[in-house]
């Protein structure tokens, strides 16, 4: 599969707007690992190889363990490896990414409210929305993974 076009050069204004969201996400209350777990899980669901490659590498740089990355797709069967907060983040990620199935359920929202302030929940939702947008850009334009030697 070859790349279709480079969104960054073809529509600079749109790309700039996406980076505005990224700038916003740099200053939210979630830590680096939490943000990368959201990005990896959404990218797994969406099948975005480019984003999976990027965010698993980023997670490792931030100190995430390979084992937790390997288990992320099956986190419900490996709950002991993820904190309660991370489990709620992953539930939210799945439900928002798969919005057409049922959306963010009341059950998951109430779990989040027990662990996070309302402003933090808004930030989590924005983090999930942003990676989903990046996934759609990556998949639609056939962003290519650079092979490492």
Image (cartoon, rainbow, N blue to C red):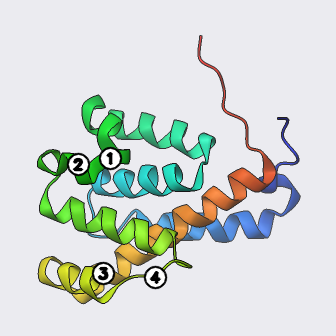
Mark 3 and mark 4 lie on one chain; the one further toward the N terminus is: 4
Element type at marker 3? helix
Give the side of residue 110 with respect to residue 95, left or right. Answer: left
Residue annotated with mark 2? 77
Residue 57 location (% of width, % of height): 44, 34
**Is residue 59 placed above or below 123 in the rendered structure?**
above
Mark 2 and mark 4 lie on one chain; the one further toward the N terminus is: 2
Residue 144 location (% of width, % of height): 72, 36
User: How busy is the neighbourhood of tag 4: few (under 14 within 10 Å), some, or many (20 plus)?
Assistant: some
Residue 68 quadrant: top left
For image coordinates 35% across by 67% down, the residue present is 27
Residue annotated with mark 1? 74
Residue 36 location (% of width, % of height): 38, 51
Say which of marks 3 and 1 sits in front.
1
For image coordinates 52% across by 52% down, the residue present is 43
How far separated are the C-alphas under marks 1 and 2? 6 Å
How far separated are the C-alphas under marks 2 and 4? 22 Å
Whether residue 148 is visible here, answered yes or no, is yes
- Between 107 and 18, the one lying in front of the other is 107
Element type at marker 1? helix
């Amino acid at each position: 599969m070859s790349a279709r076009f480079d969104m960054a050069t073809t529509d600079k204004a749109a790309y700039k707007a996406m980076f505005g969201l990224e700038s916003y996400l740099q200053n939210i209350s979630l830590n680096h690992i939490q943000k990368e777990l959201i990005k990896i899980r959404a990218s797994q669901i969406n099948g975005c190889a480019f984003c999976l490659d990027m965010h698993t590498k980023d997670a490792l740089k931030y100190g995430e363990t390979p084992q937790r990355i390997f288990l992320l797709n099956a986190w419900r069967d490996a709950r002991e490896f993820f904190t309660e907060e991370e489990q709620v983040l992953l539930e939210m990620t799945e439900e928002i990414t798969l919005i057409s199935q049922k959306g963010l359920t009341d059950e998951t929202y109430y779990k989040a409210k027990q662990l996070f302030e309302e402003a933090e929940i808004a930030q989590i939702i924005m983090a999930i929305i942003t990676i989903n947008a990046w996934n759609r850009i990556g998949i639609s334009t056939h962003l290519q993974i650079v092979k490492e030697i």
